[in-house]
Amino acid sequence: MTGLADLPLREELRGRSPYGAPQRDVAVRLNTNENAHPVPAEVVDAVAEAVRAELAGLNRYPDRDAVALRAALADYLGHGLGVDQVWAANGSNEVQQQLLQAFAGPGRAALGFGPAYSMHPLLALGTGTRWIGATRGADFDLTPAHAAAQVAAHRPDVVLVCAPNNPTGTALAPATLAAILDAAPGIVVVDEAYAEFARAGQRSALELLPGRPRLVVTRTMSKAFGFAGGRLGYLAADAAVVEAVQLVRLPYHLSTLTQAAGRAALAHRAALLGTVEAVKEQRDRIVATLRRRGHPVADSDANFVLFGVAGDQARVWERLVARGVLVRDVGLAGWLRVTAGTPAETDAFLGALEEIA
Ligand code: PMP
């Protein structure tokens, strides 16, 4: 039988495994930061109708530039953004891959502040980009001085920074972003996948876009919108950045069905985003309860919580799985990450953890 080792695979891919959280068939799945609430019935109907209206036309390629969808996304984002400043793809992962293809790649480098989203270095790997693993401070914070010093030392072509950060949930202080923007010689991508879950008072990097053509903000419909299966991510940036990603995107990368579903979902965004407050409540309940029980817990502006456990986190993870609760072991010694889901899921998680921790 042929194995991977027999194939002329790129050297840097040898011995690697594909990205993905371990899936277990358990009742309570709180491991991938999805929105636990199903798509509301009115949105199901609207999406079904919109998709149906396109079916006879599937003999034709989709709108290559997804103009109507991008206009709807620009309208959602506000901040005076126009369709030429917004770009969409199959998840923000694909958007970020396109950004690396356009602005990084062989002979260039991208930098991120770990622990952060583990797909970022993998996107670098896939695009032949050298990855620079910069660090955060204790408590996973990122001070302006620490961030700027690392960016200045490495002068990466692309900086990727999550706001809030995954897996820690940590917000990005405006002063830190300002320091990164000042120090960075190239593109700065602010990954705002969880922006809609921020606590009151947090600012989006969208506010900083005017006059900053090297700043890119990526967003997704996978989290707050509860539309992860729809695979729609997007960016907002200077129109020139949108022109740049169009040089590397595959033609017709967004199917007619995806575009129609996305437009219909955005037309019903109030219904979709109606679950955000409920998710935030569960997040805050998890933070408060675990702190009361003496767990170290990182502040969270996202739909998940990073919490400390005594001893080996992999063992606690297994014991939670045995009780029907799947959380995420992100490989941080002594920490686990749990997604905030429904009240019943929070009950199950808190109950199971109390039994074993
Ligand atoms: N950025 C961050 C920080 C994430 O956590 C995720 C999802 N896990 C993504 C981007 C990618 O989301 P999607 O491709 O579904 O838009």
Image: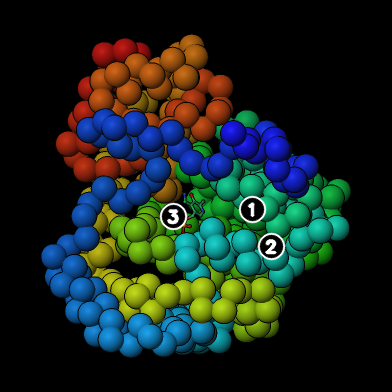
Q: In the rendered image, which quarter contains the N terminus?
A: top right
Along the line of sight, the residue nearer the viewer: 126 or 243? 126
Q: Is residue 74 above or below residue 3?
A: below
Residue where numbered disc 1 is placed: 123
- Label 3 vs 1, first from the N-terminus: 1
Instruction: Measure the alpha-carbon separation of dots 2 and 1.
Output: 8 Å
Q: Earlier in the sequence, mark 2 or mark 1?
A: 2
Asked whether mark 3 and ligand 1 are closer than 8 Å, the reply comes as yes
**Residue to which mark 3 is pinned:** 194
Q: How is the image coloured?
A: rainbow
Mark 1: few, some, or many residues within 10 Å (few <14, many ≥20)? many
Q: Nearer the viewer, residue 92 or 26?
A: 26
* Mark carried by residue 312: none
Q: Residue at x 27, y 43 (%)?
A: 341
Q: Is residue 137 visible?
A: no
| Amino acid found under the numbered disc labelled 1 | Leu
The residue tagged 2 is 100
Structural distance between the alpha carbons of marks 3 and 1 = 19 Å
Decide: marks 2, 1 in contact (CB < 8 A)? yes
Q: Can residue 83 be seen in this snapshot?
A: yes
Earlier along the polypeptide chain: callout 2 or callout 3? Answer: 2
Q: Position of residue 206 (x, y in %)?
A: 53, 70
Residue type at mark 3? Tyr
